[in-house]
Image: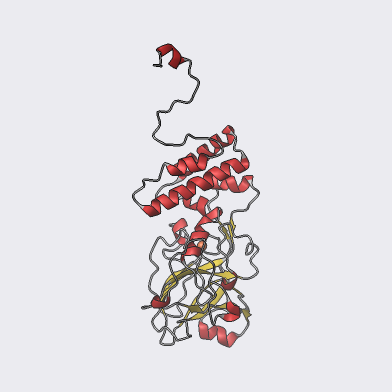
Amino acid sequence: MPDSPRDTAHDSRPARTRAGGELFTEERSAEVVAASFARTPDPRLEQVITSLVRHLHAFVKDVELTEEEWGAAITFLTRTGQMSDDVRQEFILLSDVLGVSMLVETINHRTGGTSTESTVLGPFHMVESPPRELGENIALDGKGEPCLVTGRVTGPDGEPLAGALVDVWQANDDGFYDVQQPGVQPERNLRGLFTADGDGRFWFRSIVPRHYPIPDDGPVGELLAATARHPNRPAHVHFIVTAPGHRPVTTHLFVAGDPYIDSDAVFGVKESLIRDFPVVDDPARAVEVGLPNPFRTVHFDVTLLRADQAPPAAQPADVQPTVVHGAPGGRVS
Ligand SMILES: [Fe+2]
């Protein structure tokens, strides 16, 4: 029997005009939205965006997000973008305090326990470090507790890497980098690019670093305050160490005993990167190294992987950790 207009108007059955697409429901929201990306030409983009959708939907369902909370989140992210410019990147800061920066860094620089571990680059390597002679003092502002930093760069089998480049930078005794205080600190204060000697050794004079707060006068600072978190990073010296034929490492040297060593605002601390900075009370040695007596000292050996033995840049999350044969205690990568 043919449909009359009146019959159609009173038909309560679902219209069947769709081409096989599934309508949005609370129960199947993630699957429905993920399916909308099925024709993405770039397979990696499809993998990333559909995984993001699934996790976002799971999160919203987990906390049963209210409309007010959703609005607050949009406002927070908007303000985070508005706070960002050429010298202030509030989104990176947000990534840092959520531990995402550190997770991306760690996933992409697995060492398998066979070389010096990496950590975040941080935002203050924005100028090139000046080349300096071994033994030179990088503390140009005369502040802080004098410290002799020594170390050796080797390959994975302990072979010295002569001529390795050791790029270092750190905050001053007030907890600021030179680039944060133009006109206050000398230019290139507490920065240096050193070339290791024929035995892979490097040494320079500096000060014991101090802990400092990340910028907390924006939305990320408000987030930290609202969650009773402090903004501080434990005291550290930044290093980038490079040598031909080897994988470079970007890392920190942390001061043992720092009050924030277990609560770094950006989660950058790794156990293998913490060192004692013992006091040396030896007038003759002080004269020899060119520091007032007594002074502090720290030793930091750096091991680089060969370029051809580098682990994969990334592994799918469902791959089981692999045992590194020959590593102490059968450590996993
Ligand atoms: Fe830093």
Out of 221 and 34, give the one closest to the viewer: 34
Q: Position of residue 176 (x, y in %)?
A: 51, 59
Residue 38 visible from this viewpoint: yes
Q: Position of residue 270 (x, y in %)?
A: 57, 68
**Left or right: 64, with 130 as reference point:** right
**How many discs mark residues in the rendered view?**
0
Residue reaching furthest to the left: 41
For the N terminus, the image quarter is: top left
Q: Is residue 61 above or below residue 325?
A: above
Q: Position of residue 243 (x, y in %)?
A: 39, 77
Residue reaching furthest to the top: 6
Q: Position of residue 85 (x, y in %)?
A: 41, 47
Residue 90 visible from this viewpoint: no
Out of 9 and 143, give the one closest to the viewer: 9
Residue drawn at (62%, 53%) of the image: 230
Residue reaching furthest to the front: 1
Out of 122 and 326, give the one closest to the viewer: 326
**Left or right: 330, with 188 as reference point:** right
Q: Is residue 157 above or below residue 233?
A: below
Figure coloring? secondary structure
